Image (cartoon, grey):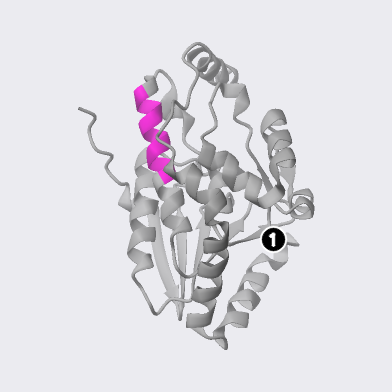
């Protein structure tokens, strides 16, 4: 039997500023790549915040100048397919916990939002990015088999053709290009990021919290015929058994040179 994942509770902090909770996650190392335990901790925090009726919004920020470069690939070097599948299941659990938050959610993107980090940004309602930020899904080079939920999050934002193009080419998009195609919401100069976030939060303060939650729920219910079936799919293999071990080993070989 597979051992349960132990959440790395020290990797996630929550600071409440009035009716807004700011969640800061990760260690800040390796472009803020998250271990399985760190994904589990983020899921726990999101589920706890979901039961807080006083909150209007939740803001997600990565540590040390990067949003999130996805899962920590060091865990996957020499890992079995079952172990990688478990890591992906934990990641997906965190994404769904964020998506299921009933209040507004904002991803503040600095540095990179890649792979699972891209998915985490898309799990939020809004994405506020520094102009120097980049976002994308460069995973095909590793022999990762994209889960249907990952593909659906992208397709809902940019349409199926653009989603396929992004997945096929694995290109990291500059923030302004990502905004142009609808992958992220707002781009500001790096120095203006915190001021824009403060202005966004202030714009909600005079609005009805119930109306804001109802607006989010209405949009999400309207999208349910598209997003619901992908969530209902049984878990599938997330790596190609022939290619993944050699590709992940080659990735680390290049990094060590």
Q: For label 1, count other residues whose C-alpha is less than 10 Å away and answer few (under 14), some (14-19) or many (20+).
A: some
Count of numbered circles on the image: 1
Image point 52% across, 42% down: which residue? Answer: 149
- 34, 220: nearer the viewer: 220
- 106 left or right of 41? right
Viewer can see residue 171: no
Q: Residue at x 43, y 35 (%)?
A: 88
Q: Does residue 139 lie above or below 218 as drawn?
A: above
Q: Nearer the viewer, residue 91 or 41?
A: 91
Q: Residue 92 vs residue 37: left or right?
A: right
Quarter where residue 115 is shown = top right
Front position in the image: 132 or 237? 237
Q: Residue at x 65, y 77 (%)?
A: 199
Residue lying farthest to the bottom in this orientation? 206
Helix, strand or loop under label 1: loop
Residue 204 appears in the picture as rendered: yes
Residue pictured at 53% horizontal, 58% vertical = 61
Q: Quadrant of the C terminus?
A: top right
Compared to residue 120, the image places residue 186 above or below, namely: below
Q: Nearer the viewer, residue 215 or 194?
A: 215
- Residue 187's spot in the image, x, y percent? 73, 60
Q: Position of residue 139 (x, y in %)?
A: 59, 30
Residue extending furthest toward the left: 1
Q: Which residues are magenta?
A: 82-92
Reply above or below: 115 against 12. above
Would you say residue 68 sits in the magenta stretch? Answer: no
Q: Position of residue 77 (x, y in %)?
A: 44, 21
Q: Position of residue 45 (x, y in %)?
A: 36, 59
Label 1: which residue? Answer: 185
Q: Where is the N terminus found, in terms of image quarters?
A: top left
Magenta stretch prevailing secondary structure: helix
């Amino acid at each position: 039997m597979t051992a349960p994942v132990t959440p790395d509770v020290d990797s996630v902090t929550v600071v409440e500023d009035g009716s807004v909770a700011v969640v800061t996650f990760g260690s800040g190392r390796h472009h803020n790549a998250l271990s399985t335990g760190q994904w589990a901790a983020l899921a726990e925090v999101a589920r706890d915040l979901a039961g807080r009726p006083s909150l209007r919004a939740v803001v997600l920020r990565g540590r040390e100048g990067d949003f999130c470069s996805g899962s920590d690939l060091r865990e996957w070097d020499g890992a079995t397919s079952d172990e990688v599948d478990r890591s992906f299941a934990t990641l997906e659990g965190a994404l769904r916990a964020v998506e299921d938050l009933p209040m507004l959610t904002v991803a503040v993107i600095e540095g990179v939002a890649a792979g699972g980090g891209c998915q985490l940004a898309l799990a939020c309602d809004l994405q506020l990015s520094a102009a120097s930020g980049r976002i994308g899904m460069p995973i095909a080079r590793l022999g990762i088999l994209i889960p249907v939920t990952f593909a659906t999050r992208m397709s809902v934002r940019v349409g199926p053709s653009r989603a396929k193009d992004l997945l096929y080419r694995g290109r990291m998009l500059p923030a302004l290009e990502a905004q142009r195609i609808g992958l992220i919401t707002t781009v500001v100069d790096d120095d203006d990021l915190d001021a824009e976030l403060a202005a966004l939060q202030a714009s909600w303060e005079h609005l009805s919290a119930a109306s804001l939650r109802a607006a989010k729920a209405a949009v999400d219910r309207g999208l349910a015929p598209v997003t619901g079936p992908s969530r209902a799919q049984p878990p599938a293999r997330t790596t190609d058994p022939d290619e993944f071990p050699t590709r992940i080993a080659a990735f680390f070989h290049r990094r060590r040179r």
